[in-house]
Image (cartoon, helix red, strand yellow):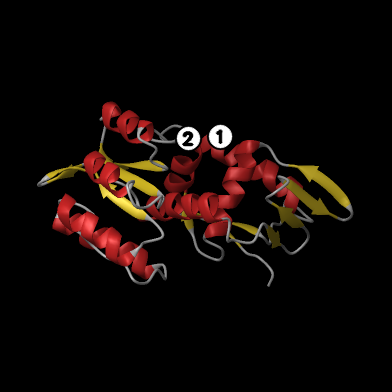
């Protein structure tokens, strides 16, 4: 639900391209309330600025009849918007402009946190990752994951087999200002490979896509 038609189309296209269906757009508070009542969505993405009010008032009206998880879209550097949204009970916020992969990572994280529908185990070529315990099981050894390693692997697992850019991964791990964290990301990648790969120097599960980012290959 957004007051910019082009942005609304962009968000819809990003979600549809990733396999989401039954996406309903609304361009005002009134349309948003009506759509939420009629469609009963699993997730709502709300812009702060709307032509007949704002996303905060829309959220308050929605909370009368639904506890649907909510992600806010907010302008860059509008700290008061972020605090207001989270203070009202929003599940997350995304700063505009954003990368498509950032939107998808945030959406999947909120859906998993709220509905816990996704598998908590992923099988790799030489190991298994148990997200519920933040552990890697490799050759009968149990290896603990740090919080950042867990978040990084989870972000890659949500896009299994797809390239996730360096920028999107830094955004997922360090928030609104990911610039300057590439070396830290590389260090986390190295440590993860030591934990999940049979031969970390020749990775087959966590692959580098030169000039773009990384992808995670899992076993079915």
- The relative height of residue 118 versus residue 54 in the rendered view (above or below) is below
Q: Residue at x 63, y 44 (%)?
A: 150
Q: Is residue 71 left or right of residue 76?
A: right
Residue 57: image location, x then y, percent: 22, 40
According to the image, label 2 marks what residue?
A: 174
Circle 1 residues within 10 Å: few <14, some 14–19, many ≥20: few
Disc on the earlier residue, 2 or 1 = 2
Can you tell which of label 2 and label 1 is closer to the viewer? 2
Q: Residue at x 67, y 60 (%)?
A: 205
User: Do residues under tags 2 and 1 come within 8 Å of each other at their CB atoms?
Assistant: yes
What is the quadrant of the C terminus in the image?
A: bottom right
User: Looking at the rendering, which quadrant does residue 5 occupy?
Assistant: bottom left
Mark yes or no: residue 43 visible: yes
Mark yes or no: residue 97 visible: no
According to the image, label 1 marks what residue?
A: 184
Circle 2 residues within 10 Å: few <14, some 14–19, many ≥20: some
User: Looking at the rendering, which quadrant does residue 9 occupy?
Assistant: bottom left
Q: Residue at x 30, y 49 (%)?
A: 62
- Residue positioned most to the right: 140
- What SS does tag 1 mark? helix
Q: Residue at x 32, y 35 (%)?
A: 85
Q: Nearer the viewer, residue 45 or 217?
A: 45
Residue 187: image location, x then y, percent: 62, 37
User: Looking at the rendering, which quadrant does residue 13 occupy?
Assistant: bottom left
What is the quadrant of the N terminus in the image?
A: bottom left
Residue 113: image location, x then y, percent: 54, 49
Q: Is residue 151 left or right of residue 76?
A: right
């Amino acid at each position: 639900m957004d007051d910019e038609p082009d942005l609304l189309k962009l968000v819809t296209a990003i979600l549809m391209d990733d396999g989401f269906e039954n996406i309903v757009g609304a361009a005002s508070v009134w349309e948003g309330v009506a759509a939420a009542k009629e469609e009963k969505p699993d997730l709502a993405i709300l812009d702060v600025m709307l032509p007949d009010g704002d996303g905060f008032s829309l959220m308050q009206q929605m909370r009368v009849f639904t506890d649907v998880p909510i992600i806010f879209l907010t302008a860059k550097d509008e700290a008061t918007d972020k605090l207001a949204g989270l203070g009202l009970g929003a599940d997350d916020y995304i700063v505009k402009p954003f990368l498509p992969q950032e939107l998808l990572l945030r959406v999947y994280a909120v859906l998993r946190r709220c509905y816990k529908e996704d598998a908590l185990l992923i099988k790799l070529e030489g190991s298994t990752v148990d997200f519920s315990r933040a552990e890697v099981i490799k050759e009968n050894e149990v290896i603990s994951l740090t919080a950042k390693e867990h978040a990084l692997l989870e972000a890659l697992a949500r896009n299994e087999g797809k390239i996730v850019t360096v920028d999107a991964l830094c955004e997922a791990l360090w928030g609104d200002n990911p610039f300057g964290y590439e070396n830290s990301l590389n260090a986390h990648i190295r440590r993860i490979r030591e934990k999940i790969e049979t031969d970390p120097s020749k990775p087959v599960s966590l692959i580098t896509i030169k000039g773009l980012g990384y992808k995670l290959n899992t076993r079915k």
